[in-house]
Image (cartoon, rainbow, N blue to C red):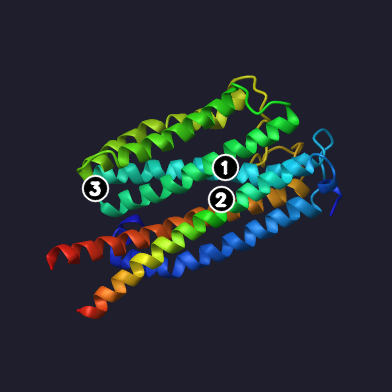
Amino acid sequence: MFSYLANPRRFMRFSAFAAPVFWLIAVLCIGLGWYQGLYTSPAEADQGETVRIMYAHVPAAWTSVIAFVGLGVASLSFLIWKHPLADSAARALALIGICMTALCLVSGMIWGYDDWGQIWAWDARLTSVLILFLLYCGYLALRYAFDDDRRGAKAAAILALIGLINLPIIRYSVDWWTTAHQPSVALDFSRDDNPLPWSMRGPLLLAGLGYLAFLIAATFSLMQADIMERRVRAREVRT
Amino acid sequence: MSVFLTQGEGIYIAAVYGLSALTLVGLTGLVIIRHQRWRNRYRALEASR
């Protein structure tokens, strides 16, 4: 699959079909997930109506982590094969990832202010997500810090690979340490006594799917733009 | 729909959803502008060949 799509011409053909499909899935799933989250899902016993923040906050958190996984894979591919499409994917994922991480942090602060009475706590989950945000900042700063584009891409790719260490810390921080943050139960399908009922998990998963489709669609569209830019610039140099 | 927007906590929910919508729409706009810009230049170049 990767080697098939590594050809820019094939990628353009594939993404011309796939990107609109993912845009459509994103609009439908986010729209439906948010509608259900705001209108039809129940309020929670402890938090009351504020629990509805979850349907916007948690999908942003998932997307920020998934984007970094993609960034790591793209960076590894770039370091091994020096393929410009891998660098292009990494840059697109970093841009969307940093916005999603910022959104996750800010929405978490608003939720925390209402729920805990403070916008920030130096708790393991919050701190590890803040480190993820700083990693995205570092990646983008390094990527554009060099006059030689390839050196910038290589340095940023190495940072992205090092940053992958942070992902299991984010995932398991709520299990390894005592934190103020709620445990991750939405994706735990093995528990019969899951504290999050399906009436809440359904809209959450739907919104999460929408955010994931948004990430894929936006990445494909940015990569398409990148390929066209390279072609235009290459032809301008020749003439 | 419940009456949560009339309660004090409604402002927090509105702020989070407003920010999220703004981020998603903003990113989509940025992607579309960049895509259109390079597609137009690429097509103009193709047409001039």
How would you rate the neighbour count of disc 3 (Cα within 10 Å): few for under 14, some for 14-19, many for 20 or more?
few
Q: Nearer the viewer, residue A191 or A233?
A: A233
**Share a chain, discs 2 and 3?**
no
Query: Residue A106's spot in the image, x, y percent?
Result: 60, 37
When the figure is inspected, residue A55 is found, relative to residue A130, above or below; the finding is below
Q: Give the alpha-carbon distance from disc 2 to disc 3, as whole Å.
A: 34 Å
Q: Give the alpha-carbon distance from disc 1 to disc 2, as whole Å.
A: 8 Å
**The residue under label 3 is which amino acid type?**
Trp
Q: Nearer the viewer, residue B31 or A179?
A: B31
Label 2 near label 1: C-beta < 8 Å? yes
Label 1 residue SS = helix
Quarter of the figure with residue A235: bottom left
Label 1 near label 3: C-beta < 8 Å? no
**The residue under label 1 is which amino acid type?**
Leu
Q: Residue at x 34, y 65 (%)?
A: B38
Instruction: Report the quarter where the C terminus of chain A lies.
Output: bottom left
Query: Residue A199's spot in the image, x, y percent?
Result: 78, 49
Q: Residue at x 72, y 47 (%)?
A: B14
How would you rate the neighbour count of disc 2 (Cα within 10 Å): few for under 14, some for 14-19, many for 20 or more?
some
**Share a chain, discs 1 and 2?**
no
Label 3 residue SS = helix
When the figure is inspected, residue B44 is found, relative to residue B9, above or below; the finding is below
Question: Which dot marks residue A81?
Answer: 3
Q: Give the alpha-carbon distance from disc 3 to disc 1, as whole Å.
A: 33 Å
Q: Which residue position is annotated with label 1?
A: A103
